[in-house]
Amino acid sequence: MNHATSRRAVLGALLAGAALTAAPARPGSPRPPAPARDGVSGGDGVSGGDPASAVRPRADRLLLGTYTSVEGGGPGIGTAAYDATTGAVSAGPALTGVADPSYLAAHPSGRTVYAVDEQPRGAVTALALSRDGRPRVLGSRDTGGAGATHLSVHPTGRWLFTANYTSGSVAVHPIAADGSLGERTDLVAHATPPPGPGQDGPHAHQILTAPDGGHVLAVDLGNDTVYTYRFDEERGRLAEVSRAALRPGAGPRHLTFHPGGRFAYLACELDDTAVVCGFDPATGVLSPGAPQSTGTGGGTNHPAQFLVTADGRFAYLANRGRNTLTRYAVEGEGAALRPLDAVPAGGDFPRQIAFSPDGRLLFAANQRSGTVTVFRVDTRDGALTRSGDAFPFPSAACVLPYRANGPSRP
């Protein structure tokens, strides 16, 4: 894949060819809900806790992100329900009006979610969740960059971070008590180092908070660098403290931390490698180790994303080129990955994977085939077993499982 070509052109060519612990906002820091933007109306916020919720049956649901502006794209943000035992998925209505919501992230409260608008004018949209599975738009904010491709919520629930792929920058927005977004508090461009081989500039692909809560890491595919920022929780500002350089042309895409907080696993899209990184919570320094196999047997692969089980014993890597999910045993308390096997993803181009809140199911969003596949996760050995037929959803780029009756593990 030539990342010097526009991201949208690549996506169009590909398609044509084929949870959650409550963390309330701090007292004394309410912010107004986001106003309407670009014809998307604002909402009146999220209602408070429901005393009757404790006796309501559990509702296991999915939100589905997609690309709406490419040929064969989806209608918007999809909704669905799934059976937590069998993994069977049943469709719900789609929410239209959000352009290219290719990535979704949940608030720790479980009451709101956020979607990127992966457009030339990057934006993020806040949505309130309801028990009937129909999200309601609260409003949108500009990210100050182009091609917003990834977002995440700070563990306090007070801040939203966004990575702008096309412009190579990262943004910060405050989150109000009702889940809506305030005006951007920071925008940091990745001006240096120079772009890697074949790249036209920086391309921020992911931004996430380290387990220590005080550091935020941004993965940039365009310049083969992972930036660490110290985060000011009062002002919503990022201050760079460290850079981790990957080998030229690696194309780092997605970083996932081991539950222990001292190691992280990096999927490198362009050179088809997995990298175990050490992490020092005191300084924020990320130390990449030697590149290792993705377990795919060679050929074009473009690994997308790691997942790690809650107990830290197993890791999974989605491989878009080979359409497989690699299973690793985690050894040395997180310091090493040992490939075990690679199973078919059950679809074409698994762009993103996610666990169910209880960790017993794994969902794969297969972008090119427009499907979501479901796997049972064996808690003893981490083995994946396909569960049922693939669920169709056009240009499925992201799947977000959640429970409508309250908070759960992300």
Image: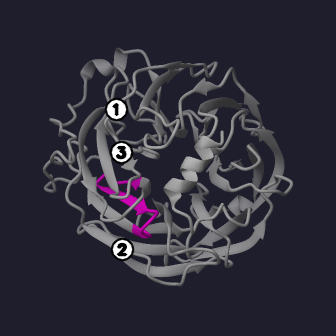
At x 68%, y 31%, the residue is 375
Image quadrant in which the N terminus is located: bottom right
Circles 2 and 3, Cβ within 8 Å, touching? The answer is: no
Image spot of residue 109 (x, y percent): 34, 40
Front: mark 1 or 3? 1
Mark number for residue 96? 1
Residue 165 seen in the current view: yes
- Residue annotated with mark 2: 188
At x 56%, y 62%, the residue is 261
Q: Amino acid at mark 1?
A: Thr
Q: Of the residues under marks 2 and 3, which one precedes in the sequence?
A: 3
For residue 75, above or below residue 51? below
Residue 161 among magenta residues: yes
Q: Which residues are magenta?
A: 152-169
Secondary structure of the residue carrying tag 1 is loop
Q: Of the residues under marks 2 and 1, which one precedes in the sequence?
A: 1
Mark number for residue 114? 3
Front: mark 2 or 1? 1
Instruction: Please name whichever residue, 311 or 17, is drawn nearer the observer in this view of the structure.
Output: 17
At x 24%, y 29%, the residue is 49
Q: Amino acid at mark 2?
A: Val
Please tell me in which quadrant of the rendered image residue 247 appears. Answer: bottom right
